[in-house]
Image (spheres, coloured by chain):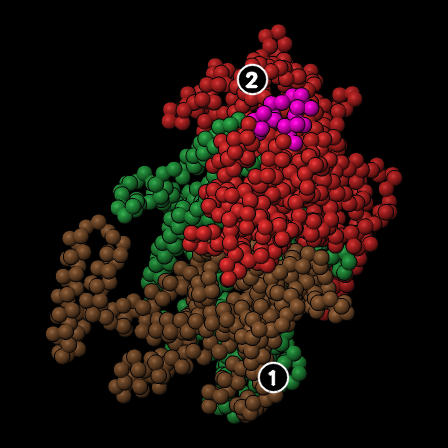
Chain colours: A brown, B green, C red
Amino acid sequence: MIRRLTSFRPQPATWLALSWLALLVGVALLVPWLPLPYAPATPDLQHIATPPDWTSASPAHYLGTDSLGRDVLAGLLAGAQRLVLLTLPAVALATLVGALTGAAAGFWGNRQLRLPMATAGWALAAAWWALSLPSKAVLWLLVCVSLLLTLLAWRTARRGASYRRRYTFALPLDSLVLGATTLLGSVPRLILLVALAAGPPPTSVQFIGLLALLAWPEAARLVRGRMLWVRVQPFIEAARASGLPMGRIWWHHALPHACRPLLAFAPLSLAGLMGLESSLAFLGIGQGPDVVSWGSQLATLRHDSTAWWVAVFPGLGLLFTLLALQKTAAFARKNTDK
Amino acid sequence: MLRWLLARLGRAAGAAWLIASLVFIGSRQLPGGPEQLALADASDLSRPATGTRATATQQAARQAVRQRLGLALPVFYVTRVAGHWHWHGPANQYHRWAVAALHGDLGVSYRDGQPVAVLLAQALRYTLPLAASAAGLATGLALALALYLARAPDSWGPRLLLSLLAGLQITPLFLLALSLLLLFANPEFLNLLPAENEAPAGGSSGQQAAYWLARTALPLLSLVLAVLPELTLPLVAGLRHEATTGYATTARAKGLTIRQLLRHHALPNAVIPLLTTLTDLLPALVVGTLVVEVLFALPGSGRLLAEAAAAHDYTLVVAGVLLSAMARLLGLLLADVLYFLVDPRLRSAA
Amino acid sequence: MKYFWLGSLLALLASACSTPPAKQASSPITARWARDPETLDPLALPNQSAYDAANLLHMGLLAIDYQSNAYAPALAQALPHPHLIGDSLTVLDYELRTAATWDDGHPVLATDVDFTLKLLHCPGLPNENSRAQYSFIRQVRIDSTNPRRFTLVCRGQGAEILTGSGDFSVLPEATLDPAHTLRRWPLATLQAWPASQAPPRAVTALVRRYQQANLARQPGNLPGCGPYRLATWDTNHQLRFRRKPHWWADKLRPAPPVLQARPQEVVFAVLPDDAAAALALRRHDVDVYPQVPARIFQQLQASPKARQELAFYTTPSYDILTAGFNTRRPALRDKRTRQALSRLFDPAGLLAATQLGQGSRTVGLLPPSSPFYNDSLPLPGLAPAQTVALLRQAGWQRRADGHWWQPGAAAPLALTVRYRAEEATFATTALQFQTAAAQVGIPITLLPAETSVLTTALQTGDFDVYIRLVKGSPFGFNFATFLHSNAIGSGNLTGFRQPVADRLLLAIPAEGNPRRKRLLLRRLQVVLQEEMPLLPLFFMPSRLAVSRQLRHVVPSGLKPGYAISALSWPATDTLRAGTP
């Protein structure tokens, strides 16, 4: 049985998963040029919440319409485009940022990462200037002190480690990262969303940033938890004993192992973001009805709970995408699992 | 160990205070305020405000409401106006709130003047038992399912189960709750909810318990189903990975069954992501799940905080954030303690 | 062990198949509320639920008769006849009913009315809402010979002076102010009290007593003369009201419709989700479901079992779906541009799509059934060709990119539409407008927002077009609150400023002669259609679904949509469980 787990011939299921993902990306990129009978977010006032029909002569609503009169098929395709162009990059960004920050926090902890004192001086001076705090004299003092410290660090660069230790301070990386994740996690998501709803609806880039902001803490915590285990492994000790610099150990040896939980996490995070979008639509916050996504289509079920066709097709699309991502992740894991 | 624990608790309390203060100051920066929703719509013809000095009256009324609620004071000790900083001293909203909170008084709600602590306690009476039992049930079910799924991955049964879990994963919570409502609380299909809207007065405690069990069965089921895939799927992946390691082969060679191997040796190594996810759920015990409470009409803390946020009821929102931040930080602390218990080689980064 | 689980599962399924219990005459009547009332303080009634509750606990001089949609005397003996003094004052003579008493037996006197009005203006109490509404009452003159007779001197003239003067709940003086300390100050002094000056000590003492009474949660501390008292209140869950066993109006013969209170117990269930509320209605957890959304109404009527158990009513309401234009924006300053944009809405299609064809289209702010409706004006409809022609007349030119430009402008014509999120009607209207405008070459941005954000944006003028419901009423035609130039900054969101319209708006409420009033109102509708600061799309219907077993159902277009105190179950011996 164990041997069966480690064999990695690409099975038919994996080919199916990869081809579904390719179809999704292809459709998403080609949507502006597809000949659709109805544009995505246009209401057809004569056909509100009609079931799928294939028989009528005029351009038919092949997958029916929702409770606002929008064609479900066109919405499906527009949602696929939004998924590929916005949600997937957001997941990728969130996973990347989370992995890097979590791995760094887990590896160096609060005491291992030492920075020269001058950095603190420059950072304080920059903050003072940016906030335009009252006293200019303090600003000049900070700049002078930072210059002095930089000079000192440059002069003592060739001397030994004990000299360097005197003029450096430990950056509490773990507390910073944990604090950031806690801040984002403690404010109930609802309050954050209500605060965001007070502003104008976000542009595409802002939307990706927003989704990434909401999803990175989880990835960071998972990777940090794993890294706490990885850094006590014998091979890391061996690497340190052989004299490799800490940065290199972190990047080449510790990071790949610490990112293992992310392969299972990434598809879940995608599902989480889709759920977040539909919850936003459910609560009435977020994009207007002229922006169609699979999550918002699911949310219109609330207005008309007998219109099963509005939820089934986006739901199936989401399900297949998730399964495909899981299969691809499992395949990738088997490939690297030697 | 005890010293470390106390230090962490102290830091947690400080961090929660900081977060609540940030929300306090941030909420006052938002446009709009509670005075707008306290006053009737000026263009409501069904209750006309007669007279032609309408604008002045409206503005005076708004200012009067702000004065009464204490919102006319400056927000913080220092404020920045047109690039310059002004010092206000202790006569500001933050100072008043902080002093009162340190004495245990979290303030009164703007909408009905009731103490915020009482409102939260009433709402938590519904949310805490529901969320805690959902988390407990989901964890137990997740462990059992993961152990089963990691044993025999290639037959059609486990594969179907995995697909079902994936399907549950992508179903948004409100869709799940709505379908349960339509299937099990619908006179057209099955009607399993009790007919009365409140517990039978004067009944025995057994009857009351039975009533509440029936009433909360559907919300509990939807919460468990919503959280289950998140807990199970990473655990299955972790267990399968652990089963391929060297020590697992040795254990099997020594004669352990696969069941014993998974339960006693692979599980402690693979359970860390589960602990992380579980402690992430801790704030949800306090803030509740808005969606489930709206659909099943439970007067829980999720609905309370959502309505407070929409009505700009700042005192309630800040108290809710304080509570949720404390729960979150305690969850983190619990996670670190559990990491240490599960794998003594892990030294937390404190 | 497994037989235990099997057995309990079977018992659960068996209980699911049982029929609902028969309703006794004394069973409570359960109605659905969409939100918790938050506070039952009679001075601050922030939402419709609190208003419904106040109508059960308290009584005012006049009350709405939902059968005829008009005000009828409640505590007052008869409707007062207004005497006009000069051109700005109205004098109303009231006499209280001799039968009206408080719970302890003391009669309701004019001093109680005087005390209530002063309480409505006391600084320090949560009465800002009431103060804005009742500041037109300037003086209370109590008749020295008859303690039940008094006169109200009001500023302003018109029908809504009469109806507005009787709307507040009368509170007892003896409970809060047994030493009659407030009698020393006349009403006008309290109304004009400057905010910077500290209030008199007696007033501060009264305010403190009021706050200690905690009327927001325990209205029983200041008992009103209404037919019910509050039994229990589970926040956000339900409220229970019980009928007082001996209410003063029980002795009146004949019983006026506004003074009837048949149910022994009234329960309000707070169910925020519409679909869940419909299921509760089907399960007989809830007996009355007012303001049913169109889709749910249609679904309920489609089920034969529901048609057997429930009764459905549709009445025309006085709420108008309107699209308003911000006349202060440079692009919308010209009335021809506004008229052009109004031709992009499709009221007929929207009415059929969102309201199941119920409701009525209109040319102005009056319903077609009103005698003052101007039927010679054309109904607004979808006409994109006219849009293009009107835009050209207003000076817009269509360039090669398809957009409309004014000569010398930096940007083409592009508009933002604001409306409240979570409402399917607004969303469909906005989408239809966007589609029609896109075909003509005008890009539209939709900005749905939640209530507080929307209110702020509308009041600061941060919008181009809005879509909202104007809540109308059959009592009087005072449109000045949202169309007069003086109301810019409060109710006049469009910024509409037109001297002819201003004169008409002030003259209409004061006009007593029906023929002259008709002329003035017709003229106003013509001016409004010409200037088009807002476009009334259609009047919304008010839908009600109740359990078929209920008797004396009075559906009405006025909120809440039914008269709860008129409902009753039939007597027990004529009722069998399951009988349609």
Q: Residue C233 or C332: which is nearer the viewer?
A: C332
**Residue appearing at x 68%, y 34% in the figure:** C374
Q: Which chain does tag 2 point to?
A: C
**Could you tell whether A108 is left or right of C45 in the image?**
left
Whether residue C483 is visible to the viewer of this picture, yes or no, is yes
Q: Which residues are magenta?
A: C504-522
Instruction: Estimate how packed mark 2 is, as few (under 14), some (14 to 19) or many (20 or more) residues with alpha carbons within 10 Å.
Output: few
Q: Are marks 2 and 1 on the same chain?
A: no
Q: Residue at x 66, y 27 (%)?
A: C519
| Amino acid of disc 2 | Asp
Report helix, strand or loop for mark 1. helix
Q: Is residue B306 visible?
A: no
Regarding mark 2 in the picture, which secondary structure is present there? loop
Tell me the kind of residue under disc 1. Answer: Leu
- In which quadrant of the rendered view does residue A316 lie? bottom right
B78 falls in the magenta region = no
Label 1 sits on residue: A16
Q: Position of residue A86 (x, y in %)?
A: 49, 69
Q: Above or below — where is B313 with respect to A67? A: above
Q: Could you tell me which chain the residue with mark 1 belongs to? A: A
Query: Which residue is tagged 2?
Result: C87
- Principal SS element in the magenta part? helix
Asked if A259 appears above or below C505 in the picture, the reply is below
x 54%, y 23%: residue: C136
- Whole-percent x, y for residue A30 in the image: 56, 75
Crowding at mark 1 (Cα within 10 Å: few <14, some 14-19, many 20+): some
- Report if the CB atoms under discs 2 and 1 are less than 8 Å apart: no
C28 displayed left or right of A257? right
Residue B149 picture location, percent across and down:
60, 79
- In the rendered image, residue C514 lying in the magenta stretch gets the answer yes
